[in-house]
Image (cartoon, coloured by chain):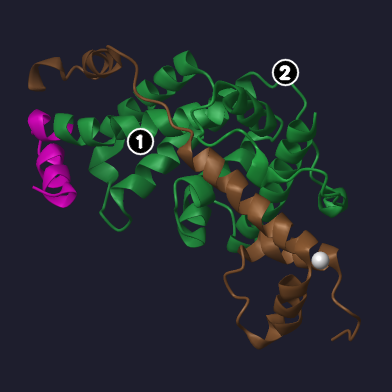
Chain colours: A green, B brown
Amino acid sequence: MDDKELILKAQQGDKKALARLVKEYEQTIYNFAFKICRDKNKAEHIMQETFYSFVKSLHQFDGKSKLSTWLYRIVSNHCLMLARKMKNRPFVSMDDDDGLFEEKYAVDWTTLPYKSAENEELKKILDNAISKLSPEYRMVFLLRDVEGLSTEETAQVTELSVPAVKSRLHRARAFLRKELNEAFQG
Amino acid sequence: MKKEKVTCKEVMRHICDTLGEDLQSDRCEDIRKHLEECSGCQNYFKTVEITIDYYKKYNVKLPDGAHERLMKFLDLEDCD
Ligand SMILES: [Zn+2]
């Protein structure tokens, strides 16, 4: 049974079909929530809220977009809501991106000891760098580059225009690269 | 159209914009040429790709019991 059939059944009140849909996407949604908030407890909370919203609004799903796109939209909204609630830390300003492209090539990345992202030290560097980005930038980078959505799908999920997605994406890429480069030097 | 020489900064911007996706088009001919000859920009391109790759590979597994807690939260625990 594919997603379409499962959704149809779930919409008709088939709880087993609903449970199968949840099971199919829970790992993806948890992983994405974690990547945005970088905290396991918050990620689980966001996952629960996401599927709760999903169940409640299931009857509105018309199948015009992919189910995954729809779920990304719900989980992104929950992540943003949570981030706005705890607006305690200032994020880096991206208004002037010129400095992002001033480059010295002190580090040769190919000789770094981090062969895999499983390295704990590397994970810390990655967490730290992305935490400096505002959730709005994080979201675009993660949806487009990490989750592999198209630019158009990313625009749909974030309710931004395509040019806005592109400009955020390019700054986020440049910023993260610069942060990692500095961390590797240090 | 400005006729000035392509700068490294311009190339880096372009890399962050497109990840080299449309470097074949005429508009990008100058950038492509620069990229072929400039090791600094080549290194930059490589490190942008590595950055994305690091984040792609950094994944977390659903914690123990999280699935059961989710099903309970959704009142679906008997449908599992
Ligand atoms: Zn150059």
Task: Please state which of residues A63 and B60 is positioned toward the viewer in this rendering.
Answer: B60
Asked if residue B48 lies left or right of residue A159, the reply is right
Give how far across and how far down residue B5 sits, in percent: 89, 79
Main secondary structure of the magenta stretch = helix
Relative to B72, is B3 above or below?
below
Relative to B40, is B3 above or below?
below
State the residue at coordinates (71%, 37%).
Answer: A180
Q: Earlier in the sequence, mark 2 or mark 1?
A: 1
Which quarter of the frame holds ligand 1?
A: bottom right
Return the mark for residue B61: none
Does the magenta run of residues contain A94? no
Q: Work out whether residue A4 can be spotted.
A: yes
Q: Work out whether residue A140 can be spotted.
A: no
Could you tell me how far apart the alpha carbons at marks 2 and 1 are, in whole angstroms? Answer: 28 Å
State the residue at coordinates (13%, 43%).
Answer: A6
Q: Which residues are magenta?
A: A1-18
Point out the image quarter for the C terminus of chain A.
Answer: top right
Identified by mark 2, the residue type is Asn
Residue bearing the label numbered 1: A28
Task: Please state which of residues A21 and A64 is positioned toward the viewer in this rendering.
Answer: A21
Identified by mark 1, the residue type is Thr
Asked if residue A19 lies left or right of residue A29, the reply is left
Q: Is mark 2 within 8 Å of ligand 1?
A: no
- The subunit carrying tag 1 is A
Return the mark for residue A88: 2
Relative to B26, is B35 above or below?
above
Q: Indicate the secondary structure of the residue bearing disc 1.
A: helix
State the residue at coordinates (61%, 55%).
Answer: A165
